[in-house]
Image (cartoon, coloured by chain):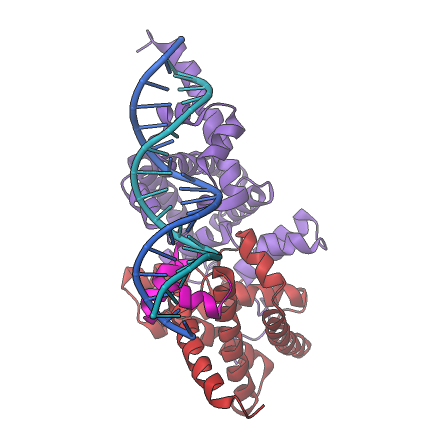
Chain colours: A red, B purple, C blue, D cyan
DNA sequence: GTCTATATAGCGATAGAC
DNA sequence: GTCTATCGCTATATAGAC
């Protein structure tokens, strides 16, 4: 295992550079508009060389998703030390995803592209990472509901899906485009609408 | 003006059929994956005939958006008779958009496709309709905030964008795909998370 | 393993007959 | 105004030299 380490490390560095480019381009243009030629040009290699590392455009996107999920896992692992409450950790994760989006590093995949979904649903590493992240979040969600800091009338999976959806909420780029708000203010506003809702927390709920 | 009415009415019926097909296909596959060949096949005419009515694929999508916005306007015009409060009207609109999505008739446009955005930003009818709908919603938003039924610390435009975003929220199809919830339940859950937030209304806000 | 050059295919749009 | 047939372009993916 240590024998081929040098060549393999060089390879890994190259592939990391590729995935980083893919990640940025996915965030900037989305999967459908991103072309493999662009990726190759951005990395500075020929397209054919790219296909030596990844079998298809879909595999490139999957690698970028794995990268982001791994980053999320690393961030979540630090939270028990800084955030004492489950709700605090969930909000910290939501804030982290929004910061990623503001930084132009949140890959955006169309929910409808079937060839891409097929690849993702057959991609073991992606599924594993997604599962691990979901498990950890689900744990915190249930704990927050038990503490009464999250609405326990909501199915935990709905809360999970909502957090995933807010990670790529189109409201964020629209707010950003108005130029009226600082990045910090955008994040605070979106956290407010996500967790507190539009009604406002202490006010009336009904009607 | 009355002279050509018959031929023009025939034309209009044909075009309505085209736009209805486009609307359904946009909801089903999204703009990027929808092909003009499919539209022609769905309507039952040749592609060249389609291009006699609409200049481009982007114009087709714009027509579908105008259709939906017009339907929304018609629905909103009925609300003062049935919904006494501004918040009630906003919730009714949100519910209506979710029903449209559940019915498979909410066209989904990518927020990133630039050629499409260019066409939309130059499409007078679309811009007018969009403006009218936004104006009416904005009015109700401000009223609801004044009554204390919507959080008045949120910029009204943020509330507006949020309502637009929830109209095509990806959480809805995901919930639907689990098969665990009735359509009515899905709508209630999403209204709850949108207006009441994840925290739950009477509970603690901070942390 | 990286390159240049090319195969292959799908799609938006149009020509031209009727 | 509708059709069939086709153009022209772009993008994924691959062949083959080095």
| Residue A205 in sight here | no
Relative vertical location of residue B130 with respect to residue A52 in this rendering, above or below:
above
Assign the N terminus of chain A to one quadrant of the image: bottom right
Query: Can residue A146 be seen at all in this image of the molecule?
Result: yes
The residue at 36%/75% (across/down) is A184
Q: Main secondary structure of the magenta part?
A: helix
Where residue A186 appears, as percent x and y from the top left, is 37, 69
| Rendered position, B132 above or below A55 | above
At x 47% / y 48%, what residue is drawn? B86
Furthest-right residue in this view: B180
Q: Is residue B171 above or below residue A78?
A: above
Residue B206, percent across and down?
A: 51, 78
The image quarter containing residue D16 is bottom left
**Residue at x 45% of width, y 30% of height:** B19
Counting labels gives 0
Indicate yes or no whether the magenta region holds residue A33.
yes
């Amino acid at each position: 295992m240590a024998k081929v380490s040098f060549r393999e490390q060089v390879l890994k560095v190259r592939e990391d550079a590729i995935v980083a480019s893919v990640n940025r381009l996915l965030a900037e243009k989305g999967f459908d508009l991103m072309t493999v030629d662009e990726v190759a040009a951005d990395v500075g290699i020929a397209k054919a060389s790219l296909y030596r590392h990844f079998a298809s455009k879909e595999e490139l996107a999957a690698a970028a998703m794995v990268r982001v999920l791994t980053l999320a896992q690393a961030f979540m692992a630090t939270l028990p030390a800084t955030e004492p409450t489950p709700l605090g950790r969930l909000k910290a994760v939501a804030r982290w995803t929004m910061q990623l989006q503001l930084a132009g590093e949140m890959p955006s995949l169309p929910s409808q592209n079937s060839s891409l979904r097929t690849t993702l649903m057959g991609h073991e590493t992606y599924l594993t990472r997604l599962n691990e992240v979901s498990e950890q979040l689900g744990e915190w969600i249930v704990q927050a509901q038990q503490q009464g800091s999250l609405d326990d009338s909501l199915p935990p999976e709905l809360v999970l899906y909502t957090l995933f959806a807010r990670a790529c909420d189109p409201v964020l780029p629209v707010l950003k485009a108005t130029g009226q708000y600082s990045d910090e203010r955008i994040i605070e506003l979106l956290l407010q609408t996500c967790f507190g809702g539009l009604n406002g927390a202490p006010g009336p709920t009904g009607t």
